[in-house]
Amino acid sequence: MTAPKIRVHVENARSKAALHQITPAQWDAACARHPELARRLEASLGWDGDVLEGALRNAEIVIGVPALRERLSERAPRLKWLHATSAGVDRVLPLDWLPKGVAFTNNRGAHGAKAEQFMRMAYSLLHMRMPEIVANQHARRWQQLFSPGIAGKTALVIGLGDLGMGAVRAAKQLGLKVIGVSRGGKKVRHADAVHAIPALDGLLPEADFVVLAVPLTPGTRHLLDRSRLDLMKPTAGVINIARAAVADYTALAEKLERGELAGAVLDVVEPEPLPQDSPLWGTRNLIITPHISCDDGDHYMDITLDLWFANLARYVKGQTLRNRVDPRRGY
């Protein structure tokens, strides 16, 4: 007897960047790469809710978190699995809207390779004093700013998920000493040492680079606050590839302006896009990148769909899904 088709709906938002949208061509290409699993599926693709209500009535799986989540259990009575195409799910917390018994997975694993490349650049930019050199160029000022070799400096990587491990790998490639900080303090590959969050205050004075790679939760909001920034040495730099709210940007900007920190690279700000009148634009020795550090510009959705199909293989076998979001932890 032929197994019944699994109804899956893909929900897109036109407000998102093109690389965060799953097109029919990308879906078809992914199905061609996973033909055995694809034959089990009956799929629909929608944009901004245009076919959402009809699709939800029979959908067993939804890819992409719908903008309207009210009464989801009533509107999607057959829903068993919801997949977010981002790693961070802080924008849909708390998960009180998630129907009981529905598995919610995120896109962890799609960002690490690109994060690793970005972090090699970010470490080098700060070490070579490039923010100050660029400022001098714009001011038509010739000032020779020499820097030593980077090997032997210390990177403190806070958060050891997909992004954090990319930062760890990049640091080791540059010859840095790596100290990791995570919720549980469990040892990970390539890190010279790993500590739990309570040890953070004692570790910050050792760091030449402080990397923020944690998910945004109530426990990590303003994790790098004014008092912790004050623990850093003035020659150190900050790199944030997580969420803006995990650091106190007002305090960070003040310390940069006073020369109490050497520099910062911020890939995330709040709000996004950053308003033209934000003082961050002109902050001394600060580089802002527009939330582009960890997404592959050519293949992000290909990577995403391959990860999803790998999880689908587990789903059809009744195995536990990878990347399940814990509603209590928020990631």
Image: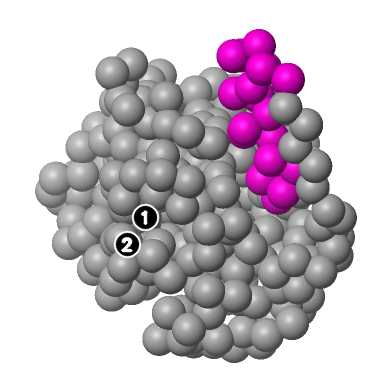
* Disc 1 and disc 2 in contact, CB within 8 angstroms: yes
Q: Which residue is mark 2?
A: 225
The image quarter in which residue 104 lies = bottom left
Work out whether mark 1 precedes mark 2 in sequence or the reverse, and give the earlier one. Answer: 2
Give the left or right position of residue 110, taking residue 258 as reference. right
Please give the name of the residue rendered at 75% of the width and 66% of the height, measured from the top-left corner.
153
Q: Which residue is mark 1?
A: 247
Looking at the rendered structure, the kind of residue marked 1 is Ala
Q: Quadrant of the C terminus?
A: bottom left
Residue 264 is one of the magenta-drawn residues: no
Please give the name of the residue rendered at 72% of the width and 27% of the height, measured from the top-left corner.
143
Which residues lie in the magenta part? 121-142
Q: Position of residue 307 (x, y in %)?
A: 65, 53
Q: Position of residue 221 (x, y in %)?
A: 29, 61
Cα–Cα gap, marks 1 and 2: 6 Å
Please give the name of the residue rendered at 60% of the width and 57% of the height, measured from the top-left corner.
235
